[in-house]
Amino acid sequence: MAHFIDRRLNSKGKSTINRQRFIKRYKQQIKRAVSDAVGKRSVTDVESGEQISIPKRDISEPIFHTGKGGKRHIVHPGNDQFTAGDKIERPLGGEGQGSGAGEASNEGEGQDEFVFSISKDEYLNILFEDLELPNLQKNQFAQVTQYETYRAGYQTDGMPTNLDIVRSLKGSVARRIALTAADKRKLGELEEELRRLREDKHENTLHILAIEKDIAALKAKIAKVPFIDTFDLRFKNYDTRPLPSSKAVMFCLMDVSGSMDQETKETAKRFYILLYLFLSRTYENVEVVYIRHHTQAKEVDENEFFYSQETGGTIVSSALKLMKDIINERYSDGAWNIYGAQASDGDNWADDSPKCGDLLTNHLLPACRYYTYIEITQRPHQSLWKIFDAVSTAHSNFICKHIESQADIYPAFRELFKRADASAR
């Protein structure tokens, strides 16, 4: 029988195996709680863990009891109110009261829910499960083909620097045990026989001499087995293989004009932070280009994109033109998977919206694998949505989504980046 001992490091007071089983068992409840929590968090708190409340009825375990069969007569001590055959009246209670003596509590401090804390990594794993960049293709290897060195077992010859001492010593021990085990066992038996003969009072000189000769021969034979032999040496074997890397770039375009109130900007930031976490956590080789625009567009860094405050008019085409110029300048060699994500409240100059449609149709969408447009507004759609909606109908790699509140972000995000095989199921 083999015994396996799990010695992986666990955080204090927690069991890794039990946590994994619990999360797997109550995955649907946890996913619903995570989905609800995304819309309630602040922009700076998207990446932390979460406390999940699970109804107690969902975690109760069935219990089987073995009861006594047949008819039984039991006398309970202290019964001075009832006799056999009496009917017990239903306890009196008004609205909001149970059968107890106290009144119903309005504090909600019952035991109807079980609170389970998940870590940041567990939270993000559930958050981005079954999501991927659509239409991602390995266009080519990286600009300079990269090779990955990996362990490929052991070999019997190699460079001294690759000698695995521990593995070689294990082979030495195994070989010496295999070659000397029988002789050592016989040597022990002869030594025990010699000791018995020497303690015997009878004359056993000839027998003792014969045994001593055999013992000397066995010791010499055992001593001839070398401590380590060239047959025992094991060298680490390394090999290389080409490491394909999907080169992808994500363009993030956000409207920061005066028509975008603070709540709308916060919603847009939340969507982009969710997108940024998804990209940085799932893909190692994805570049992100941040473009903010009002009447003019500007490429900015991550911190300025999320936290700087700007106002002004709205010309959406300025951001699309800048995206086109950056693609032509830095990503036009055909080796990149290009993605775009744009967030706006839909406000734009009426004569600028057709320009946006033309830029998308003739320049950006032919170069992009996937482009998403998020409109965050509670007002009726304006000319920009109508143009973009017509473009999405004609192009399968362009999709528009309407968001009214922060609660709509996560469902829309999952629909935008859901895995193809997951949607098929």
Image (cartoon, rainbow, N blue to C red):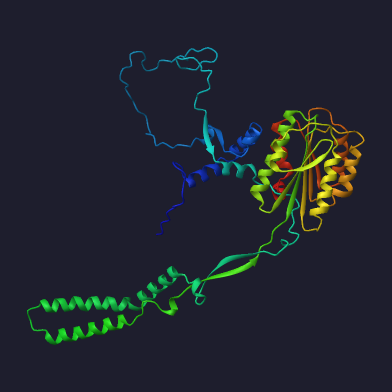
Left or right side of 279 for 200: left
Q: Vertical placement of 340 versus 139: above or below?
A: above
Residue 90 x/y as whole percent: 47, 15
Q: Quadrant of residue 290?
A: top right
Q: Quadrant of residue 258?
A: top right
Left or right side of 37 for 254: right
Q: Vertical placement of 42 versus 330: above or below?
A: above
Residue nearest the viewer, comparing 64 with 389: 389
Residue nearest the viewer, comparing 263 with 5: 263
Q: Vertical placement of 281 versus 218: above or below?
A: above
Left or right side of 14 for 33: right
Residue 315 x/y as whole percent: 86, 36
Residue found at the very far right of the displayed protein: 351
Residue nearest the viewer, comparing 46 with 193: 46
Residue at the (17%, 79%) spot, across then down:
194
Residue at the (73%, 62%) spot, across then down:
143
Q: Quadrant of residue 33?
A: top right
